[in-house]
Amino acid sequence: MPYVELKRAFSSACREAGIKNFHFHDLRHTFASNLVKNVVDLNRVKELLGHSSIVTTQRYLHSQAEEKKEAVETLVGKSQRFDNKRQKSVKSSEGQVLTHSVLIS
């Protein structure tokens, strides 16, 4: 029998597939998050989602921020594996002594 109502058909498909706690709106969220992850302009994402305000669209930026943090943490973890590094100290504009590793190639 053909599906008449999309949301009801989606619910039926999830139930038949054994998928729990997944809603039709989750597809929209995944769509928006993937656009942001692939660096699509936020105004274009806003238009595709039909949001009237950019503030609503900005809710999808959280996933991108977390991924950026993870990427930096991965880079930091890799740089700490190098044996050939030395410490360099510099003074900040506030007079604090800052120490960081400098890789020697």
Image: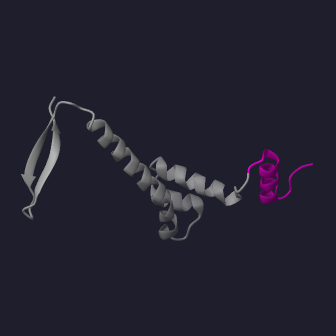
The stretch drawn in magenta includes residue 14: yes
Q: Looking at the image, which residue is at 59% across and 64% down?
A: 50
In the rendered view, would you say 105 is above or below 21? above
Would residue 25 be found to the left or right of residue 101 on screen? right
- The percent coordinates of residue 37 (x first, y second) are 48, 49
Q: Looking at the image, which residue is at 70% across and 57% down?
A: 21
Pick the residue in front: 19 or 6: 19
The main secondary structure of the magenta stretch is helix
In the picture, the quarter occupied by the C terminus is top left
Pick the residue in front: 16 or 56: 16
Question: Could you tell me how many numbered marks the image carries?
Answer: 0
Q: Quadrant of residue 75?
A: top left
Instruction: Report the magenta residues as a range.
Output: 1-19
- The percent coordinates of residue 89 (x first, y second) are 9, 48
Q: Looking at the image, which residue is at 47% across and 60% down?
A: 43
Q: Looking at the image, which residue is at 53% across and 49% down?
A: 34
Would residue 68 be found to the left or right of residue 85 on screen? right
Q: Quadrant of residue 71?
A: top left
- The percent coordinates of residue 61 (x first, y second) are 46, 59
The stretch drawn in magenta includes residue 53: no
In the rendered view, would you say 11 is above or below 102? below
